[in-house]
Amino acid sequence: MEKNILITDIARFSVNDGPGIRTNVFLKGCPLKCAWCHNPETISSKPELYWKRRLCVQCGACIEACPKDAIMPPIAPEYSSSPDSVYLKIDRFRCDGCMECVKACKYDALQVVGKSMSVSEILDEVELDMPFYNNSGGGITVSGGEPTSHAEFTLELLKGAKKRSLHTCLDTNGYCSFSVLEEIAEYSDIILFDLKHISPSKHFEMTGVSNSRILKNLELLCGRNSEIWVRIPVVPGFNDSMNFHKEAALFLAAFAGNIRRVDLLPFHNWCQDKYDWLGIYWPYREIDALDPSFVEVFTDLYHQYGLVTTVGGSGFEEVGMAQGF
C-alpha cells in the first residue's frame, strides 16, 4: 500500500522554479521558521484551517458544529471583513483540528489546508501537462515546506517521476543530513538550493536554525557534480545590503564551477492573505515588495566571480540560451 503525504498545492505552469514550464508540488512541513516565509501554510506538517473572512457571512453554523467551543460568536459581516478588523473567527488554542466546522460551512469560508495524496496520485496529475514539459524543457519541481523532511516519500516521488521520463528539480533549504540529500540528489536533474544568510547568528535569528549544516551540505553537494541553482531570497533588513551580497558572492565563488547559476528572488508581500487566513500575525505585512531593479544592482558582484545570475529565477532564460534563441 502506498504511503500518503500532505500536499498544500500542485501549482501548474510555474516558470520560476527550474527550466521551462513546470508543475510545482508543495509538500507540507518544514524545520525552518523563516520570518518572511511566503508559504506559511507549508511550515506545519499537520492539516490546518483557513478562515477566509471575505467569504464568511457569519451564519453561526460553525459554532454549532464545533465540539471544542473554539468558534467566536458571529458579528456583522461588514465589520468582520473590513481591512481594519481585529476579529478572529477561530480560537486556535482551543481548536483540535477536527474540521467539523469545515463540513458545516456552506460558503467555503472555512477550508482545510493539506490534502493527503500518494506518489501515484501526484504523478498522475503532474503527467497531464507532459506536452508542455516536452516543448519547454520543463517537468516536476518538488518543493514545500521542505522535501528532505519527508525523505522517503520525496525519494519515491522523484524515482517515480524519472520512470515516467519527467525532468526533476528538488527545491531545498539544505537543512538535513547529507546522506539524505545525497540519495535524493541522485534522482534530481537540478537542485534549487536556498541560501538565506552567511552569518550564523543572523540565520538563526530569522529562521530558528543554524546555517552550519546548510553551508556544509552545499559544499558537499558541489563536490558530487550535481547541477545546482542557488536561490537567494532578498529580504528587507535581513540580506538586502551590499555587504551581504559581497560576502555571499565570495562564498559561492569557491564553487563557481559547480553552481550553474544564482537566482536573486526579490521579497514580496503577496502572501499576506495566507497569514490572515491562518490567524497569524506577520511582521512583514506592511513591508513593500522589492522592485527587481533594486535587486539588479547586486548582480555585478556575482558576475565578477564568474557566477551566472538572474533576478526572479525565470527558467526560460536557461532554455533560450541552450537552444540559441
Image (cartoon, rainbow, N blue to C red):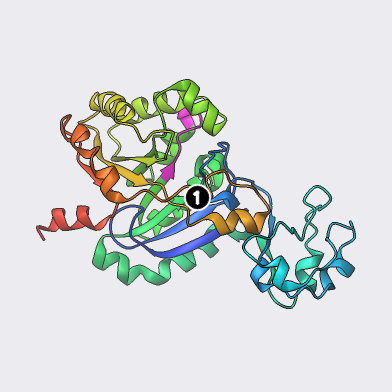
- The amino acid marked with disc number 1 is His
Q: Tell me: residue 238, above or below residue 12.
A: above
Instruction: Tell me where residue 77 appears, x and y as whole percent.
Output: 73, 72
Closest to the observer: 227 or 15?
15
Magenta stretch: residue 174 in it?
A: yes
Q: Tell me: residue 209, above or below residue 20.
A: above
Q: Which residues are magenta?
A: 171-179
Q: Is residue 106 left or right of residue 199?
A: right
Q: Which residue is mark 1?
A: 38
| Rendered residue at 46%/21% (across/down) | 200
Instruction: Tell me where residue 258 appears, x and y as whole percent.
Output: 24, 33
| Rendered residue at 20%/57% (across/down) | 319
Q: Quadrant of the C terminus?
A: bottom left
Q: Is residue 69 left or right of residue 150?
A: right
Q: Quadrant of the N terminus?
A: bottom right
Rendered image quadrant of residue 316: bottom left
Secondary structure found at label 1: loop
| Rendered residue at 51%/31% (across/down) | 176
Closest to the observer: 5 or 247?
247
Closest to the observer: 195 or 273?
273
Q: Residue furthest bottom?
A: 106
Q: Residue furthest left?
A: 324
